[in-house]
Image (spheres, rainbow, N blue to C red):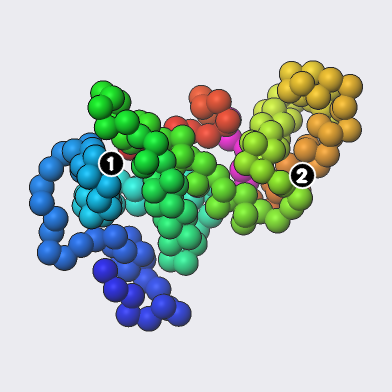
Amino acid sequence: MPFYNADDLTMREVQNVVQLDPEPPQMELNDYIREAVRKRDLFYFSFFLHHFDKRLNGVIYRFLTRSGYDRYDPARFLDYKLEVLQMLLYCLPKFDPEQKTEFLKYAKHYIRDGLLFCRMIGEAGSISSLAEYRRVRQIGAIYNNSGKSRAEVVSEFAAQSGYKDESGSADELLSIAQRNRSIVFLYRMEQDEDGEEPARM
């Protein structure tokens, strides 16, 4: 769908950015992906996106809301959406169309990484990778939820995370976490391994 004015995006435009006109042929979502991989034809991937779009919008809305961001900021929403689409394209060739696993279950980790990457970029700081960003969020969650002193949290986190005697590194992570937390409330511990609520597809 076209943008009428790229300098003044609307939520309707960014929500419908991958919608096709006319409607693509009707298939199961996973069948689009199988055809895209088997035939190496991205038209099928675009058909998949057309039908997955509303669910993807919901995933991004929930993520932005949980992160304390304005979910009605069209430019931010589009950034997140394009990053997730890029991650889906990245993992598409790695998907085995013969396996019984659905593509969305396979791609869940990549989708979450795309969302986390966008949030990481939005939080200024000296974070070099998604892995380090997860550690920052993890130690921040522990500190905010445990009621323990800073020294106790740093010591325990250093031991659990393999920092061993490098508690200075864990302390630096906690400093970054506290600085980021002052920007936006980020540290809600959920069931997922990296502190993120699993994206509902």
Q: Is residue 72 left or right of residue 49?
A: right
Checking the image for residue 96, the label placed there is: none
Residue at screen point 87% across, 27% down: 166
Can you see residue 54?
Answer: no
Q: Which residue is identified by label 1? A: 37
Q: Is residue 39 above or below residue 105?
A: below
Q: Which residue is identified by label 2? A: 176
| Spatial separation of the CA atoms under disc 1 and disc 2 | 41 Å
- State whether the magenta stretch is mostly helix, strand or loop: loop
**What secondary structure is found at the residue carrying circle 2?**
helix
**What secondary structure is found at the residue carrying circle 1?**
helix
Foreground pick, 22 / 154: 22
| Quadrant occupied by the C terminus | top left
Q: Is residue 10 above or below residue 33?
A: below
- Magenta stretch, residue numbers: 185-189
What residue type is disc 1 on? Val
Q: Indicate the position of residue 62 as horizontal and vertical percent values.
A: 42, 45
Label 2, residues with CA under 10 Å away: few <14, some 14-19, many ≥20: many
Foreground pick, 31 / 61: 31
Residue at screen point 23% across, 55% down: 43
